[in-house]
């Protein structure tokens, strides 16, 4: 049987789901996933509620946690967190801070397309050294993807305000989230040569540079929609 989960669902589908994913009929979920334009009587959320739940928990309990996003969580707790998100629960979110942080990374990595769609991947890498160009590209993102990107960057700025306690630095965070926001398009398996590997390092540096801009610059004009 097809198991419904927010993990593996698209951002575009999740923003239209106001109830826990497991309560949605499979047919409706497929409809949301396949629709070019979603027909719905309700207004969508600005960002998926599941991303908000995880970030809100980390914001309240994890900003000062040493090695946040660097120390892995426990598989058993990740499963509990996934079930909590998919089924809905009045109970507090289960798991340690590290498990919640990893659940956020896994959720962002599980979407069919990354936050920055594949068709904008190359233009982001080409612009990575120029903040104004990067900013213009983000303004052109589909609305819900732009919301998620800016929301997460604002949260990461807050995380980095507590660098003295959590030990993180901007470069580390930019590198980690660069690989998630700008996930590589699927490639042929034969692309494992040393040249490809060295090329990958260059690409990863560009991804980190792209994200770095949004961690060190004030984004309030974005939030105000300028």
Image: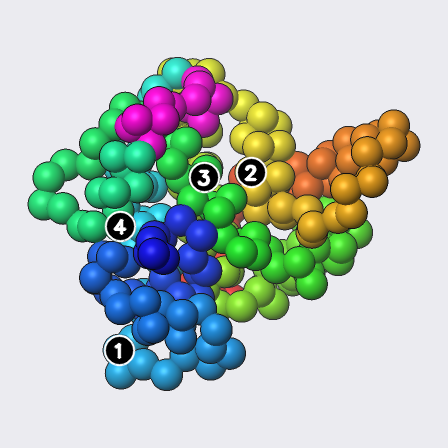
Q: Is residue 195 left or right of residue 13?
A: right
- Which numbered mark, 1 or 3, is in the foreground of this view? 3
SS class, disc 3: helix
Q: Please name which of the two marks, 3 or 2, marks the residue nearer to the observer.
A: 3
Q: Main secondary structure of the magenta part?
A: loop
Q: Is residue 133 depicted above or below 190 in this figure?
A: below
Numbered label attached to residue 106: 3
Residue tagged by mark 4?
A: 86
Q: Quadrant of residue 139?
A: bottom right
Q: Which mark is residue 177?
A: 2
- Say if residue 223 shows up in the picture: no
What SS does tag 1 mark? loop
How far apart are labels 3 and 2 at the CA level?
12 Å
Q: CA distance from mark 1 to mark 2?
A: 31 Å
What span is in magenta?
67-78
Measured from the top left, where is residue 173 in percent x and y?
A: 54, 30
Q: Which residue is mark 1?
A: 42
148 with respect to 23 (left or right): right
Q: Is residue 73 magenta?
A: yes
């Amino acid at each position: 049987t097809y198991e419904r989960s927010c993990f593996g669902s698209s951002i575009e589908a999740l923003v239209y789901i106001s109830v826990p994913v497991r309560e949605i009929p499979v047919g409706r979920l497929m409809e949301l996933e396949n629709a070019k334009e979603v027909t719905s009587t309700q207004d969508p959320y600005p960002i998926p509620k599941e991303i908000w739940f995880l970030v809100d928990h980390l914001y309240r309990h994890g900003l000062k946690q040493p090695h946040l996003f660097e120390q892995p969580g426990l598989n058993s707790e990740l499963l509990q967190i996934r079930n909590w998100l998919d089924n809905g629960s009045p109970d507090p979110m289960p798991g340690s801070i590290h498990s919640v942080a990893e659940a956020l990374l896994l959720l962002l990595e599980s979407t069919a397309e990354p936050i920055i769609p594949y068709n904008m991947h190359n233009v982001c890498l080409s612009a990575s050294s120029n903040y104004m160009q990067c900013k213009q590209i983000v303004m052109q993102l589909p609305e819900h993807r732009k919301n998620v990107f800016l929301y997460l960057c604002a949260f990461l700025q807050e995380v980095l305000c507590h660098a003295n306690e959590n030990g993180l630095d901007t470069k580390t965070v930019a590198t980690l989230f660069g690989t998630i926001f700008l996930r590589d398009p699927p490639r042929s398996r034969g692309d494992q040569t040393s040249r490809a590997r060295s090329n990958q390092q260059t690409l990863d540096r560009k991804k980190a540079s792209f994200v770095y801009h949004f961690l060190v610059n004030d984004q309030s004009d974005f939030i105000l929609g300028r």
